Amino acid sequence: MASFQKIYDRAAKRKGGEAALEKLLSEHKPKSKAALRKLGDDRYLADMTKRIFQSGFVWRVVEQKWPDFEAAFHGFQPGRVALLSDEELDDLGRDTRIIRHAAKIASVRHNAIFLTELAKEHGSAAKCFADWPEEEIVDLWALLKKRGARLGGNTGPYFLRFIGKDTFIVSSDVAAALIKAKVVDKNPTGKADLAKVQAAFNGWRDETGRSLTALSRILALSTDAPKG
């Protein structure tokens, strides 16, 4: 496995030097565990929903409609949204204020139930996410995929990234960089390959003292079209 310094040097060269690279990295900093715990569970449901609706869609349109999403889904209070009836979901599917995608609308109720379950298990969903060890972040991805709705693939990791949880994201560029570094030999999607990726990130974090978020960005920026 390549030393991370070589990857960093390649990214810095591509972006015009270390100062330029560090400026880019400063724009993507994870929140502290304390800050994540302070977020209401409604904000976790809201961000899950935003990433789900943005997946495969124009992000700007979702952003423009977001105040109406907040109103339509009762401020994303998990307890309230978990009790939405099938008839209410049908009504939302005809609501012109939001994006009318029946499966994605249904996922909001499913994920509200998921978060209320986490709250019963951990005191709050926020506490579960905040306290989850970053050295096992792919297991949190697996939890989101198994118990949540439409949170598989990169949707779950993007939700974590945007809410402020420290995570790497296996974008196409990060995958290419991981292959170049001989961590894996193909796009890592299976459990065994993701375990290798987690181990590599854990090692690089120990080597550099950087967050998983920063490491992921550096990997992406070391390739031709940064997205990670």
Image (tube, rainbow, N blue to C red):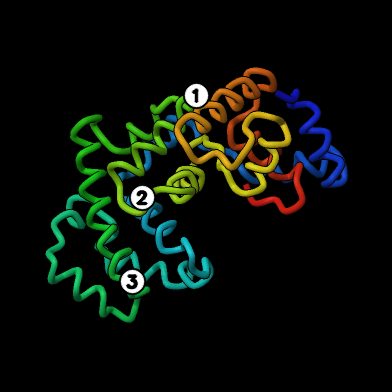
Residue under the image location 65 percent in, 23 percent down: 204
Residue 95 seen by the camera: yes
Labelled pair 3, 1 in contact (Cβ < 8 Å): no
Q: Position of residue 79 (x, y in %)?
A: 18, 50
Residue under the image location 24 percent in, 45 percent down: 114
Labelled pair 2, 1 in contact (Cβ < 8 Å): no
Residue under the image location 23 percent in, 57 percent down: 109
Report the mark closest to the observer, 2 or 1.
1
Q: Amino acid at mark 3?
A: His
Which residue does the numbered mark 1 point to in the structure image?
135
Q: Position of residue 159 (x, y in %)?
A: 45, 48
Which residue does the numbered mark 2 point to in the structure image?
43
Q: Secondary structure at mark 3?
A: loop
Q: Secondary structure at mark 1?
A: helix
Q: Vertical placement of 102 versus 134: above or below? A: below
Report the mark closest to the observer, 3 or 2.
3
Q: Amino acid at mark 1?
A: Glu
For residue 72, which quarter of the picture? bottom left
Q: Secondary structure at mark 2?
A: helix
Neighbor class of circle 2 (other Cα within 10 Å; few <14, some 14-19, many 20+) is some
How far, Cα to Cα, is label 3 from label 1?
A: 35 Å
Between 75 and 17, the residue placed more toward the observer is 17
Which residue does the numbered mark 3 point to in the structure image?
101
> Of marks 3 and 2, which one's residue comes earlier in the chain?
2
Residue under the image location 82 percent in, 47 percent down: 15
* Res 197 label: none
How far, Cα to Cα, is label 2 from label 1?
A: 24 Å
Q: Vertical placement of 68 versus 218: above or below? A: below
